[in-house]
Image (cartoon, grey):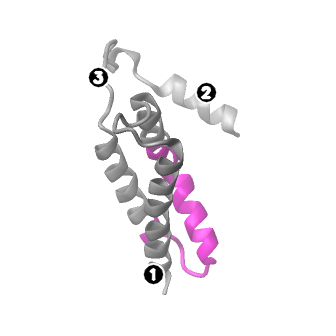
Amino acid sequence: MPVLSLFAMLVLTDVGSVAPAAAPADPRALELAWHRCLRDSYAHQPPGQSRAGDERNALDECKVQEDAFVASLMAAGPPNDGRSGTVWSRTWAAFVQPLTAWIGGLRR
């Protein structure tokens, strides 16, 4: 199935509309787009599913935005403020925990 999806994406992509030297996307804007997608997708899950099922489906529907966000973070490289990777991972964990708590609050 993933190979078919990749093939469909490549076939349906309009190569002429892609700028050859596109500027890197703003990670903050991509992060906001990903969060917006997660909220919208989670809100439209069919009733009767488990919370884990709702979350998995929302994450699956927003995979493209997540991939773009992560790619922009990786392209930007580590922050130039002298923080180590450990501090960066703790910062990321501090972001993920409130997000999962917020999604859990929607379910209640």
Dividing the picture into quadrants, the one containing residue 50 is bottom right
CB-based contact (under 8 Å), mark 1 and mark 2:
no
Q: Helix, strand or loop at disc 1? A: helix
Residue 24, position in %: x, y?
A: 33, 27
Q: Residue visible at 35% across and 14% down?
A: 16
Task: Name the foreground residue: 90 vs 67.
Answer: 90
CB-based contact (under 8 Å), mark 3 and mark 1:
no
Instruction: Quote the CA–CA distance across marks 3 and 2.
Output: 25 Å
Which amino acid lies under the numbered mark 3 shown in the image of this protein?
A: Ala
Residue 37, position in %: x, y?
A: 39, 56
Instruction: Quote the CA–CA distance across marks 3 and 1.
Output: 37 Å
Task: Name the foreground residue: 9 vs 63.
Answer: 63
Q: Give the range drawn in magenta.
A: 42-66
Circle 2 packing at 10 Å, graded few (<14), some (14-19), many (20+), is few
Give the mark, 1 or 2, whose residue is nearer the N terminus: 2
* Magenta-colored segment: predominant secondary structure: helix
Residue 55 seen in the figure = yes
Q: Which mark is residue 27?
A: none
Give the mark, 3 or 1, whose residue is nearer the N terminus: 3
Q: In the rendered image, which residue does mark 2 sit on?
A: 7
Q: Which mark is residue 105?
A: 1
Of labels 1 and 2, the one closer to you: 1
Q: Residue visible at 56% across and 66% down?
A: 55
Q: In the rendered image, which residue does mark 3 sit on?
A: 23
Instruction: Quote the CA–CA distance across marks 1 and 2.
Output: 37 Å
Q: Helix, strand or loop at disc 2? A: helix
Q: In which quarter of the image is the N terminus?
A: top right
Q: Is residue 65 above or below residue 55?
A: above
Which amino acid lies under the numbered mark 1 shown in the image of this protein?
A: Gly
Task: Name the foreground residue: 73 vs 66.
Answer: 73
